[in-house]
Image: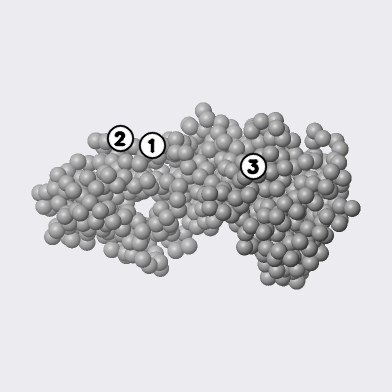
Amino acid sequence: MRNTFANAFYEIAKRDPRLFLVVADISPVASAAAFQKEYPERFVNVGVAEQVMVGVAAGLALRGCIPFAYTIATFTIYRPFEQVRVDCCYQNLPVRLVGIGGGVTYSTLGGTHHTQEDIAIMSAVPNMSIIAPCDPAETIAATHACIQVPGPVYLRLGKAGEPDLTSQAPEPFQFGKIRFIKKGRDACIISYGPITKMGVDLAQKFEEATGRSMAVVSAHTLKPLDREGIGSILSSYPLVVILEEHSCVGGLGAQVKQIAWDVRASCKLKAFSLQDKFIHFYGSQRELWAAHGLDEDLILSELENS
Amino acid sequence: MKESKHTFDVVAAKNRCRKFRKRILDISQTVTALHIAPAFSCLEVVDTIYFGLMRRNLGKDSDDTFILSKGHGSLAQYVVLEELGVLKTEELDKYCKPGGHLATHPDYGLPGIEASTGSLGHGLGLAVGMALADKVQKKDRAIYVVMSDGELQEGSIWEAMMLAPTLGITRLVGVVDLNDFQSLGQTSKIHPNFYPVLDKVRAFGWEAIEVDGHDASAIYKAVMSGSGRKPFMLIARTTKGKGVTYMENVPIWHYRSPSPIEYQQAIKELESSAA
């Protein structure tokens, strides 16, 4: 995703002189290096200084530019939170805040480098939009979609090596709309970000084990959330499953439960999220998910009995 | 700094600032509390920037920019904008009232307001971004940012201070309203090692000059003397509550409206200073 983002950004920035890349001593490599070489005046490394990274990005936006502020997700939005809230959101400026390593991507770097509550926090700030693509192709689409959004956007990315999940998707990416990436009739799993891969695998295993078909949906735009699309899923599937690499507090699961109440949903609704706890456990990203209950076999056995 | 004006009428400036103080006092009688002393301390600075240094009326994308990073001093900016006809008197009359748009802190999008401030430590970073955009787009615009001395305790200011010279920003003029007061007391007592400010700013790669911040001529000349090769910081020594003796250096006037008797007394002092 990191390289894909850099390549997509480079392609757009070559044609659109409004784009700037403002980084805080972390760079998305790949085509970012070419961008830096060809357009040094539009590549700014502020150093290890995230408050001014976001402040400068907002200042550029005040002059009509479209800045992408880029670093590790925790440092993109937590460290300079007030610059995000006041400079970007309160003034409603087109700053693109790119967080690499969203969720627990940096599994062995520890809790200081995890974003388990970023969707909740960014969702709560007015004017903010949030996009969390599930694979490289969605990352390209999300980067392009960013340009059109009039206000601030938080772009939550994984890291590298995510597999393709959407090349066969029956629906295209559209900002603000959920998207079926696999059709199904009997159950529907809604996810976002790299953990969507687990959703796709679960759907296949669920079908093999139960003979029932399961759709997979990418809810890439977490804000504005496609309430209508989610409401429609809640009304048409007997079993709806939420799978997210985010705390159970204020993420997609919590929001879908609110929608379920509003549409008087009668389906079974299962939400699988990270716990409301910091993780002091080390291992691979999948092992960290499992430590919080996001384990493929465990979820499958629970769904088989639903 | 390269500026279009070569002279600045300091007598006219003095008369304007007297009028501005009276206008702020008038507004004080319509609200329960307001930041009167922080506005009085930076009034000559704001007036000199708008009437002496800034180039305006060249068009939205060409005019120089003013950011009041110490947003709580907003009345100083509002009365100047009113004098310039940018803000309507009817609008300022509705200060902090339902139906009005002007309140304690400047809000981006209102006439003449180029950034939302009020949370301290934001203005300089925004200004560096704006100056960078101007530099890349080859626009010759200056940006003026007025900060408070207490505000310089925010780390974000020093992040911006470090970055501006690194980026080769030259069309940026910061002003520190050095009135030695912050909410809980004297800045010099809360942070004795904050001084001397001038050396610290220079050490970060800025040109800097310290002047009497109520001396319009000194402010004007200092900024005009900048080489234009570095960002410039004016350290303006000021008196909080300047112009009304009973308010000067008395912390309570940071956020308070005078009583009708105190109001009369203040107006009388200002009028007698005109004689």
Labelled disc at residue A172: 2
- Place of residue A220 in the rendered image (x, y in percent of width and height, measured from the top left): 34, 45
Residue at 31% across, 55% down: A255
Q: Can residue B28 be seen from the camera position used here?
A: yes
Labelled disc at residue A141: 1
Q: How far is mark 3 from mark 1, CA to CA? A: 46 Å
Residue at which label 3 appears = B88
Indicate the amino acid at tag 2: Pro
Mark 2 and mark 1 in contact (Cβ < 8 Å)?
yes
Query: A41 or A36, which lies in front?
Result: A41
**Residue A148 in which image quadrant:** top left
Q: In the rendered structure, the residue with mark 2 lies on which chain?
A: A
Mark 2 and mark 3 in contact (Cβ < 8 Å)?
no
Indicate the amino acid at tag 1: Ala
SS class of the residue under badge 2? loop
Q: Nearer the viewer, mark 3 or mark 2?
A: 3
Q: Can residue B202 be seen from the camera position used here?
A: no
Q: How far is mark 3 from mark 2, CA to CA? A: 50 Å
Colour setting = one colour
Indicate the amino acid at tag 3: Lys
- Place of residue A130 in the rendered image (x, y in percent of width and height, measured from the top left): 41, 47
